[in-house]
Amino acid sequence: MKRLEFFYDFVCPYAYVASTQVRALAKACNAELVYRPVLLGGIFNHLRGTSDKEYAPNQMNPTKTRINQRDLERYASLFEAPLQKPASHPRRTVLALRAALASGALPEASHALFDAYWRRGEDLEDPRVVEAALGAAGLDGARAVSSAPAQKQALIDSTLAAFEAGVFGVPTFRVDQELYWGQDRLDFVARALDPSRDGWTELDKSARPVASEIEFFFDYSSPFAYLAHTQIAALEAASGVSVKPIPFLLGALFKAVGTGDVPLFTFPESKRLYVAKDIDRFAKRYDVGFRFPDVFPLRSVAPLRLYLAAQAELPGADARRLSDALFSAYWSHNRNISEPQVLAEILGELELPAGLLEAASSDQAKQALRTNTDYAVATGLCGAPTFKVGGELFWGQDRLPMVAHAARVGFPPASSTSP
């Protein structure tokens, strides 16, 4: 029997959403479920101590915050997990975490306290709330609360052990010493536990599409956009609608919303290593080549304008072939597509007009890129790839199943009180 370790803190809404799935997932995969409570703030403190850069993962620009909040709402809806933010969120969860450890029934106590915080919006800093939540779960809440101080070192040790294992956020899952971060990685967790499974999250693929089009915002400079691009045909098949590609300048968007040019460079080492492994997992899942290029970050203006020129002058199928080749050249074959000579070689290999290079320098191509980038900013993007379905934005190649679901079924309207 494999072991599924679940690292969490009650303060995190994503950990709560994941908690609604872990028991069923472990049972379905015949796995032993082990609960690992940690103090998320303690992990952040450890991370700050290992980096010469200030690490503030919860300090996001308003655009990214809005997208993440809506994303959380959609996952809560998908997992049928009621979500009610406490009035003064975030609250300190030290007492609740220690009480859960002291309860003698860590799984039951953890789910009871998750529910108190996120289903009912209760304040876990209040000992009476913690006692009542545990009592309602059939546990001795008074004893757990009174014994909580004795669990101080146990919680410190659990948090340090998680950090040393490479945990940098919650929820995190560990299977066979491999880490999976986020409620959005349950499909990978399920396959790690049971390779015969296709995944965990079930989405409706039978409904008649409710959307007429999916907009796909991308820049060749993003490895995540590359991964998404390789799945566009599959997305069209899954969603039943066509995908409209919209190339834009990611660096200009970052400047507009207040993000650093290369967010990856701001991550602590444990997160950088994890993201690299996560990219490799998706590449293997999609069965596509991937090699991190020697030249990074990429100055993507030239290839973006070239593709826009192809969009204007060539049939759609030829423009798509060019985009496929540009992404593959950079992210699979280590070719510097910012160089005119490389772009000329790619056009020759595809037997496309060499004159497209000149067209890429035209005022028309330059204006098209500015127009697309302005549209991306006005639409509310925070990164690439982003998909737009009606009024909904989905950020990341890992949201492709959600994009297809939105196109076929849709999601409940956004709440004004999401965390």
Image (cartoon, grey):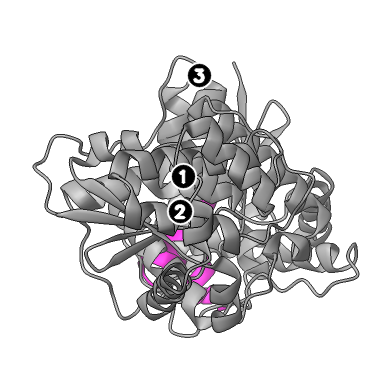
Residue at which label 1 appears: 323
Is residue 127 in the magenta section? yes
Q: Is residue 71 left or right of residue 260?
A: left
In the image, 356 versus 124, the foreground residue is: 356
Query: Label 2, on which residue?
Result: 307
Amino acid identity at mark 2:
Tyr
Task: State which region is magenta.
Answer: 110-130
Q: Nearer the viewer, mark 3 or mark 2?
A: 2
Residue 254 vertical position relative to residue 138 in the rendered view, above or below: below
Tell me which numbered mark, 1 or 2, is placed earlier along the sequence.
2
Residues at marks 3 and 2 touching, judged by CB atoms closer than 8 Å: no
For residue 56, which quarter of the picture? Answer: bottom right
Please name whichever residue, 97 or 31, is drawn nearer the observer in this view of the structure: 31
Say left or right for 215 vs 412: right
Residues at discs 1 and 3 in contact (Cβ within 8 Å):
no
Three-letter amino acid code at the position of disc 3: Asp
